[in-house]
Amino acid sequence: MDMTQVKKEDDKKEKTEEEVVHLRREIGLLPAVCLIIGTVVGSGIFIAPKGVLINSGSVGLSLLVWALCGVLSLFGALCYAELGTSFTKSGGHYTYLLETLGPLPAFLRLWAEFFFIRPSVASYVSLAFGRYVVEPFYAPCDAPTVLIKLVSILGLTFVVAVNCWSVTMASRTQVTLTFIKMFALVLIIVPGFIALAKGKTENFQNGFEVESITLDRLPLAFYNGLYAYGGWFYLNFVTEEVINPNRNIPLAIICSMVMVTVCYVLVNVAYYTMMTPAELLLSEAVAVTFANRALQGMASVIPFLVALSCLGALNGGFFGAPRMLFVGAREGHWPPIFSMIHIRRHTPLPAVLLLYPLVVVVMLMTGEIYQLINFASFSRWFFIALATLGMLIHRYRFPLHPRPFKVPLVIAVTFTMVCFFIVGLSLYSDPWNTGISCALTLTGVPVYYLTVYRYRLPHSWRRFFDYLSKQLQILLEVAQQEVRTY
């Protein structure tokens, strides 16, 4: 009798713990690797080759830029592996700036992320998805811009719905799309190297043309290359949901970045095997042009695979970025409604939903895609450099702080210095876009001091926002996290 009652009480306790509202640790090593690869390998490798070649000036230098961007991204990823195992909170850049440099830089990173970095990044990935879906049906004519944007919005809506519905579904979707996009890369690499083995090397003759190199445009070449590698930090956004993070975060980062770097260099070699630099610059969809040359029988499949690749990058972004907003709201730097979780789905629903209208607005207003890359890259890389600088300062100030994974000092210093150099030189290379990006970031300073630091909002405003927050909480069926997960 007593044993039966104890069993019933244990069952009741287990059920209660299952129903507790919190983000669960559901991301193992394979989903972690797929999250990084799936977010990194998006539209970048199919769009950025043109931007890298324009700004580097030659085939040989563009391949060198691709390799160096991979090494630099690996260095940065290793720094973030140390940060992710030293500070066990989710939130990525925001959390690391908060813990090492203080609340103002952290708030500015949050402000920049959700008002122009994330909407810009998500909009050009979405537009790449729409372009690769629509253009094959209109070739050789130009596809209607309105239709491209409509399809882009449909793809965006699907990703938002998946991430609102279930963490497990979003994770499984990412794994599936990652395997598809790796197949797409192999499909490009293999025929390119077969042609190379047959002696098709004319496009590599005189690969380094010194007279075509312009130092003022070289940072923009790196921006386009680094954009294609962007995403190595997304696993750090979901640290609280990674199983055994001290082991899986460094392992996933190293495996994924080495694999991506090798694939990217090989893909670009394949591109130049089948296309002259002039033909690559004229192409609006490099992978499609390549498929028409090398894969006549499967040319129609490539745009579909590239579109799925873009969808995977978009899904990874929407899986990770809202966790930064979620943590920021939990720390008091954003309205409390965004620190809430759906009571049944256990997803950060309000944080995911906030991104949707912001991305749609930027997508409808967007201009040249390469301007968007330069525009978003300045603030992104400036804050990444600040985060790794903060890591070095934290090492010096708190040498006894537990660090399960520690990156060599020379790697951390090299990465930080290169990032600051590229950011500084870009102000000279593209002063308009980088200047606007810098100015928009600084608009967060008065917002921080008025609404966060001193909380000077009028009482009537505070009462209105509290009422609105309560109504949204009821409508969205969300609640504060009930279990500490860090």
Image (cartoon, rainbow, N blue to C red):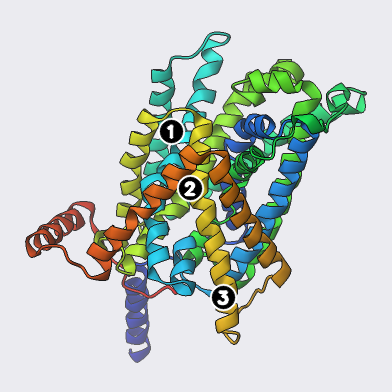
Nearest to N terminus: mark 2 or mark 1 = 1
The residue sitting at 42% across, 43% down in the picture is 436
In the rendered image, which residue does mark 1 sit on? 155
In the rendered image, which residue does mark 3 sit on? 393
Viewer-proximal residue among 184 and 362: 362
Query: Exactly how many numbered labels are in the figure?
Result: 3
Viewer-proximal residue among 455 and 298: 455
Task: Tell me which corner region of the image, top left, top right, bottom left or bottom right, holds residue 192.
Answer: top right
**Is residue 410 shown left or right of residue 107?**
right
Residue 319 in picture, x, y percent from top left: 45, 51
**Is residue 416 shown left or right of residue 484?**
right
In the rendered image, which residue does mark 2 sit on? 317
Viewer-proximal residue among 175 and 18: 175
Whole-angstrom CA distance, mark 3 to mark 2, is 29 Å
Report the amino acid beneath label 2.
Answer: Gly
> Nearer the viewer's eye, disc 1 or disc 3?
3
**Is residue 302 shown left or right of residue 22?**
right
State the mark number for residue 73. none
Task: Tell me which corner region of the image, top left, top right, bottom left or bottom right, holds residue 463.
Answer: bottom left
Which element is circle 2 on?
Answer: helix
Residue extending farthest top: 141
Residue 441 in picture, x, y percent from top left: 39, 52
Which element is circle 1 on?
Answer: helix
> Nearer the viewer's eye, disc 2 or disc 1?
2
Residue extending farthest bottom: 2
Report the amino acid beneath label 1.
Answer: Gly
> Nearer the viewer's eye, disc 3 or disc 2?
3
Which element is circle 3 on?
Answer: helix
**Do the residues under discs 2 and 1 have CB atoms within 8 angstroms?**
no
Residue 51 in picture, x, y percent from top left: 62, 32
Whole-angstrom CA distance, mark 2 to mark 1, is 13 Å
Considering only vertical position in the picture, is 169 above or below 286? below
